[in-house]
Amino acid sequence: MTKTAPELPIEVDSETGIWTSDALPMLYVPRHFFVNNHMAIEEALGAEKYAEILYHAGYKSAWHWCEKEAELHGLEGVDVFEHYMKRLSQRGWGIFTTEEIDLDAGTAKVRLEHSAFVYQMGKVNRKIEYMFTGWFAGAMDQILAARGSELRTVAEQTQSGAEEGCDHGLFVVTPKH
């Protein structure tokens, strides 16, 4: 394993202790802390209900993030989506790769390797990265809206590295019907 310094900009306010990256406030917490809290909430609400809540929250957050980042860096279209995948990967959630993207069709396929959830939970034989799902539709829809498109999308996790026989996660974005 080769270790490197973080590739994303990190600033810490010396008075408040607030971390920022790309002008957005951030929290820096251990992976086990985050995943343990995530699993406690899933246990209390049930995976299906929790996934639904996270989908909508993640969608909204991805839209906001992509909007701010596009503005800050002068990005548009596929470049915004690729920047988002890069930043997610740099933050330790896993390595996100855009396998396919077609803005005109409102479709994308995202591969997830080295998932933080799989590293923490192991092979539990179910889709456990549902927290990410709304992120991809939110990012896609923000990009589409910025292009003046009325098209909106939905995202679905089709496989997880936590499932037997799978070594990576896969998410698919398609037009909303």
Image (tube, helix red, strand yellow):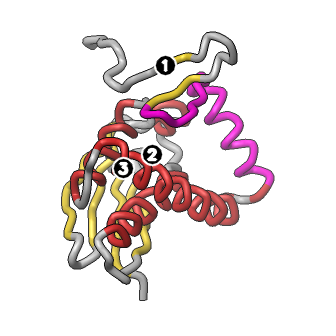
Is the residue marked by circle 3 packed among few (<14), some (14-19), or many (20+) residues within 10 Å? few
Q: Is residue 153 above or below residue 133?
A: below
Number of numbered markers: 3
Q: Name the residue under label 1.
A: 11
Can you tell which mark lies on residue 162? Answer: 2
Q: Which of 88 and 167 is in front in this view?
A: 88
Q: Which residue lies furthest to the bottom in this view?
A: 177
Identify which amino acid the numbered label 3 is placed on. Answer: Glu
Residue depth check, mark 2 versus mark 3: number of the one nearer the observer: 3
Q: Mark 3 points at which residue?
A: 71
Q: In this view, does 23 lie above or below 1?
A: below
Is the residue marked by circle 1 packed among few (<14), some (14-19), or many (20+) residues within 10 Å? some
SS type, badge 3? helix
Give the quarter of the image for residue 143.
bottom left
**Is 14 contained in the magenta span?**
no
Distance CA(mark 1)–CA(mark 3): 19 Å
**Is 30 contained in the magenta span?**
yes
Q: Looking at the figure, which quarter contains the N terminus?
A: top left
Q: What stretch is highlighted in magenta?
A: 22-44
Can residue 139 be seen here? The reply is yes
Distance CA(mark 2)–CA(mark 3): 36 Å
SS type, badge 1? strand
Contact (CB < 8 A) between labels 1 and 3? no
Relative image position of residue 129 (x, y in whole percent): 49, 50
Relative image position of residue 80 (x, y in whole percent): 29, 52
Residue depth check, mark 2 versus mark 1: number of the one nearer the observer: 1
Identify which amino acid the numbered label 1 is placed on. Answer: Glu
